Amino acid sequence: MNLKIIETENEHKKMKSELDLLMDKNPSVGTADFNYMTLLATLIEKYEKEHYPFELKSPIDFIIFRMNERNMKQSDLIPIIGSKSKVSEVLAGKVTLSLPMIKNLNKYLDIPAEVLLDTKNPSTALFDADQFPLKEMNNRNYLNIKDRTDVGFRSALSDFFGTSNLQSIGDVAWRKSSKTSTDDPLVLNSLCVWETFVKKQSEKYNFYKNYKKDIVDDNFLRDIAHMSRYENGPLLAKDFLEKNGIALVVEKHFLKTKLDGAAMVNKYNAPVIGLTLRYDRLDYFWFTLMHELVHVKNHLFKSTYKYFFDTIKFDEDSTDILEKETNDIVDEIFIPHRVWKTSPAFRSRSREGIISFANSQQIHPAIVAGRLRYELKKYENFTDLIGTGKVRRLFSSEVTA
C-alpha cells in the first residue's frame, strides 16, 4: 500500500490491519519495516485524533458516540448485540459482552478492538474474565499473567488475543451436538481461545507459502487415505499436508466444548486443520481429519464462512445437511459406495473379512471396522481393530498439557 493521508474508514481499517501484521513481525529498529511501521502509526494516530476529537472514557461511550454519529436508534443495535433487552442492559453497563458481540461492534460500527477490550482501563472493559477458561488457559501456558488480579487476567487475555484476531471471532460455523449449547458464553469463548491458539501455531512456520488454490482435490484426499495403512500414517499425513501449505495442529479441546476438529483460514489466507484427539483411536483420527479436509476442498474458500468447527457424531446420524453431505464424501473417499455392500467386510462381518478388504483398498483396518461398527450400531464389536491408544502418542510432543 502506498502511504498517504487516511481519508476514509475503509483506508483506516486497511492500514490498521497492515500495522498489526508488521507489529507481529517485531521488526528491528532502523530497518525498512520498522520505519514503515512508524509511518503507518503516525498516519493512523492523525486520523483518529481528527475523527475522535474528544476522549471517550469507556467502550459504552464509544458505542453511544457511533450511534449519534450515524443517527442510530437502540433498535439498530439488536442485530449486532442481540435482543432489545440485551441492548438496553449493555448500554446501561449492566452486562458484559461476549467476544462474538465485540467482533460485531468492531466490524459493523468500526469501533477499534483495543477500545472494546479497553486494556488501559480494564475495569471498564466489556468482556468478563469469568467467562473464559482461565484455569485451563493458565495450565497450558497460554497466558502471561503478570499479576493474579482481575486487571492482570484481563490484560493477559488482551495480549493473548491481540487486536487482529478479533476480526474473525464470531464467524465460526459451529456444528454443535445435541449436548452442546453455543448460548453459553464460556463455551463460545473457549472455542475462540482454542481457535486463536491453533491459528497462532500455524503461523509460526512459513510452509503456508506452498499452498496453492484448489490443490485439495479427490486425488489429494485419496493419497491421504492411503497413508492410513501405515502405523505412522498420521505423521505421514501431517508432513504431506505441510509440504502442500496446509497446517495440521493438534490441541486438546476445552471442557464443555466437545470439539473434535476444525477447518479454518489463518492470516496468510492458508488453510489450517485443527484436531483435538478427543478420542484416541485411529478410526476417529482418520475420519475427523478427512472430514475437515473435505471442508477445505468444498466449503472453506467457497462460502461466507472461514471457520468450520465440528463435533463428529459416531453414535447418531447428523441432521445438518452440510455435515451429512461432508460425511458421505468422507465415506466415499475411504471406501467407494459401489464396493462397500458387496465387500467381504460387510458380507462376512468378520475380523478376517475386515483385514482382507482393508488391504485391498490400501487403508487401515480401523477405518473399515469403524464404518461397520457405525452402520450396525454395534460399538462393542471389533474393539481390537479400531486402533485404540495409537494416535495421541504420535503427537505427544505437540499437545499442550
Image (cartoon, rainbow, N blue to C red):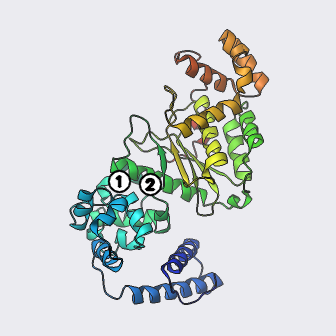
Q: Which numbered disc, 1 or 2, marks the residue that appears first in the sequence?
A: 1
Q: Give residue 248's position: percent from left, percent from top.
A: 62, 48
In-front residue for pair 160/390:
160
Q: Give residue 284's position: percent from left, percent from top.
A: 58, 32
Check disc 1 and report the residue beneath it. Answer: 132
* Figure quadrant of residue 88: bottom left
Position of the N terminus, as image quadrant, is bottom right
In-front residue for pair 56/234:
56
Q: Residue at x 77, y 28 (%)?
A: 362
Q: Give residue 352's position: percent from left, percent from top.
A: 71, 12
398 is higher (above) or lower (below) than 342: below
**Does residue 401 appear anywhere in the picture?**
no
Q: Residue at x 30, y 68 (%)?
A: 125
Q: Amino acid at mark 1?
A: Phe
Q: Give the class, few, some or many, for how many residues have Cα within 10 Å of label 1's Cα (few <14, many ≥20).
A: many
Asked whether the beta carbons under mark 1 and mark 2 sit within 8 Å of each other, the answer is: yes
* Figure quadrant of residue 339: top right
Check disc 2 and report the residue beneath it. Answer: 193
Q: Secondary structure at mark 2?
A: helix
